[in-house]
Image (cartoon, helix red, strand yellow):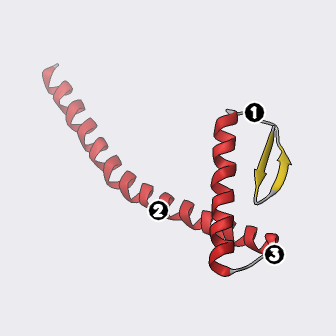
Amino acid sequence: MKIEIYDQSYNVSADQNEEYLKELAAYVDSKMRAISESTRMVDSLKVAVLAALNIADEMFTLRERQQEIEGPLRKRVEKCVAMVEKALEQSN
């Protein structure tokens, strides 16, 4: 499958859904173009590195938020399971 990112064509194997791969390529392309516009940088390698840093920052931020949610949620689930197990023991 052929995708285009920042005016460069790439042939990639689409083991997953082709639409998904196109969406990923469009996302990377939009990040690179936004960085290029805001920095007025034309070197595609430097733009790609800055885009990668930007995307990595997004990923780390989302991962941190997920951990902030999962920690308290996991504790609540464990508490609920313990209460259900206790109720089952008492009913036997």
Residue 51 percent coordinates (x, y): 67, 67
- Mark 3 or mark 2: name the one nearer the start of the chain: 3
Q: Which residue is mark 3?
A: 43
> Which circle, 3 or 1, is nearer the viewer?
3
> Which circle, 3 or 2, is nearer the viewer?
3
Q: Amino acid at mark 1?
A: Asp
Examine the rendered structure and indicate whether residue 49 appears above or below residue 27: below
Residue 83 shows which numbered tag?
Answer: none
Residue 15 shows which numbered tag?
Answer: 1
Q: Confirm or deny contact between disc 1 and disc 2 (CB under 8 A).
A: no
Q: Residue at x 22, y 31 (%)?
A: 84
Q: Residue at x 62, y 64 (%)?
A: 56
Residue 66 percent coordinates (x, y): 43, 55
Q: Is residue 90 left or right of residue 70?
A: left
Q: Which residue is mark 2?
A: 64
Q: Residue at x 77, y 74 (%)?
A: 46
User: Crowding near pointer 3: few (<14 within 10 Å), some, many (20+)?
Assistant: few
Instruction: Tell me the quarter of the image containing the C terminus.
Output: top left
> Which one is nearer the viewer's eye here, 90 or 66?
66
Q: Amino acid at mark 2?
A: Glu
> Which circle, 1 or 2, is nearer the viewer?
1
User: Crowding near pointer 2: few (<14 within 10 Å), some, many (20+)?
Assistant: few
Query: Could you tell me how far apart the alpha carbons at marks 3 and 2 are, in whole angstroms?
Result: 32 Å
Q: Quadrant of residue 35?
A: bottom right
